[in-house]
Image (cartoon, rainbow, N blue to C red):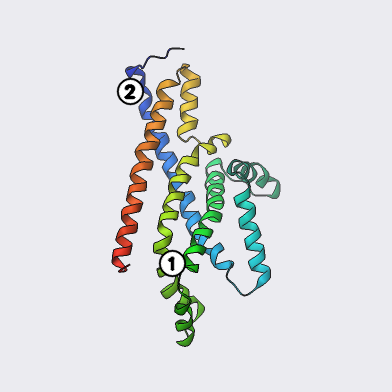
Amino acid sequence: MSFHWRWDFTWEILPRLMWATVNTLIAAGAGYAIALVLGLILALAQRTGWKPLTLAVREFVEFIRSTPLVLQIFFVFYVGPQFGIRLSPWMSGMIAIGLHYSAYLSEVYRAGIDAVPRGQWEVCRALNMSVRNTYARIIIPQALPPSIAGMGNYLVGIFKDTPMLSVIGVAELMHTANAIGSESYRFLEPYTLVGLIYLAISLPTAGLVRLFEGWVRRKLGL
């Protein structure tokens, strides 16, 4: 095994890694979209007046947060078929990532909602607004700005956790880098390039999240 950098080999493997980057971004984006929607549903479900539902959702969130993502990926892909749920590796990975991070985002949403002054709730009740309109028009718009930072952190976290999808054969970045290394017995170039690609995506994403947070706060006069 050689430890000197080979530029010819680098240019040879770069197209494969670029395609793998696209796959990784798709997996991360789809998983994050699921997490955003499901996380809000879980957060709102914990605020209902029906205690059995609130308790069940709270325990579900704690269970998801307390078990590793890789175990959940295995469970969705390998255990699901035993209950008649047969999913492709791609679909299984996206659902597992979305489910896992929805538990974390639900806590981000919950903290944002709890930060809304109680006076806002009282005014809505005094105006005889429905619960749906109260959340949609008053509470959630005020809860989102302080939640953006946490939501952005988990977006970067999802992107960095996509290598776990390689355990079920999803051709994301790390899976492709491992395949290249196994074929060529050279791991220096593919692993280095993967690290640089992760940095090239994660760092600008974090910066864009901060800019978006500032823009939202300015728009709302916060």
Q: Quadrant of residue 3?
A: top left
Compared to residue 89, the image places residue 144 above or below, namely below
Q: Which mark is residue 11?
A: 2
User: Residue 159: x, y in percent?
Assistant: 45, 43
Compared to residue 67, the image places residue 16 above or below, namely above
Q: Amino acid at mark 2?
A: Trp
Instruction: Assign a secondary structure to mark 1.
Output: helix
- Name the residue at 46% across, 40% down: 160
Category of crowding for the residue at label 1, using alpha-carbon neighbours closer than 10 angstroms: few (below 14), some (14–19), many (at least 20): many
Instruction: Report the front residue among 113 and 86.
Output: 113
In front of the other: label 1 or label 2?
A: 1
The residue at which mark 1 appears reads as: 143
Compared to residue 191, the image places residue 147 above or below, namely below
Category of crowding for the residue at label 2, using alpha-carbon neighbours closer than 10 angstroms: few (below 14), some (14–19), many (at least 20): few
- Name the residue at 51% across, 78% down: 131
User: Residue 2: x, y in percent?
Assistant: 43, 12
| Earlier-in-chain disc, 1 versus 2 | 2
The answer to whether residue 138 is left or right of residue 48 is left
The answer to whether residue 209 is left or right of residue 78 is left
